Amino acid sequence: MHAVTFDFGQTLVALDTDLTAARLAERSLPFDPQRIEVALPEAWRAYDDAIHRGLGGHPWKVFMRALLEQAAPSPLGEEALADAVDFLWSEQPRKNLWRRPIPGMLELADDLNDAGVPVGIVSNSEGRLAELVAELGWDDRFLVIADSGRLGMDKPDPAIFAWTAARLGKSLDRIVHIGDSLAADVEGALAAGMRAVWFGGDPKRALGEKARVARDASELRRVLADLGVPGVAERAPAPTRASNRPGSRPRST
């Protein structure tokens, strides 16, 4: 039996650009959420580059700095830019900016659970990811949450994947890790001995036989099925009904 692990940001949830703009407005910095959205790909390239180059400091700050530089309506001075990045970083434990569910991914986690597949999260986070998952009402979905900020080890270090595997009760070669970062998720998981799926990645990129690419949740289901993971057949459209709280998993009574 397989196990499956997910990255958190940009895999299970996306950056909430409205919330990001609102937090920046608290520092008298006017940002348009749409401009933030457009700037995301370049910021993630900066994040991956920082990991590849082994730059000092947390790659989150590299990402956010690049994002704000690209999305600013006019150039920010160095002091204002550094202040904004530090403010957002310091506020992450209290109001994490990554909380917008990516379509179909939580439903996939539900189906894996229903099929008896152990599911976990492996994330380069700030130390309070378990609390965020609980706040969002998703904690019943994930058997293990490996938060780099709490463990003191980051992806792509194989140690964080090994820690997760031990708690899932699976050997590394029986786990499929899914994440959006080529450097942190795909290369890290492969180095640890896992299989990997590059979520939202470039399908033309040669990754080797132990890695695949999936651009969305539907494609990810097909990839996981090809890898022999049970419980991932495409869901039939659900009948119209009153919705639960967004992102929450219905609970039996």
Image (cartoon, grey):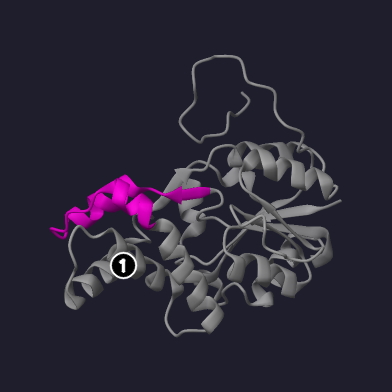
**Left or right: 137 in relation to 178:** left
Near-viewer residue (28 or 31): 31
In the image, the segment drawn in magenta is 13-39
Can the viewer see residue 229?
no
27 is within the stretch colored magenta: yes
In the image, what residue occupies the spot 56% across and 73% down? 151
What residue is rendered at 74% in x and 50% in y?
118
Direction from residue 116 to residue 131 in the image, left or right: left
Query: Which residue is rendered at x = 76% and y = 47% of the image?
Result: 223
Magenta-drawn stretch contains 14? yes
**Residue 193 in the image, given as x and y percentages of width and height:** 79, 71
Residue highlighted by disc 1: 90
Residue 140 appears at what percent x and percent y?
Answer: 61, 43
Residue drawn at the location 48% of the way across and 77% of the way down:
50
Mark 1 crowd level (few <14, some 14–19, many ≥20, 10 Å Cα):
few
Q: How many labels, in total?
A: 1
Residue 187 versus residue 8 in the image, above or below? below
- Image coordinates of residue 78 in percent, x first then y, are 20, 77
Is residue 78 visible in the rendered structure shown here? yes
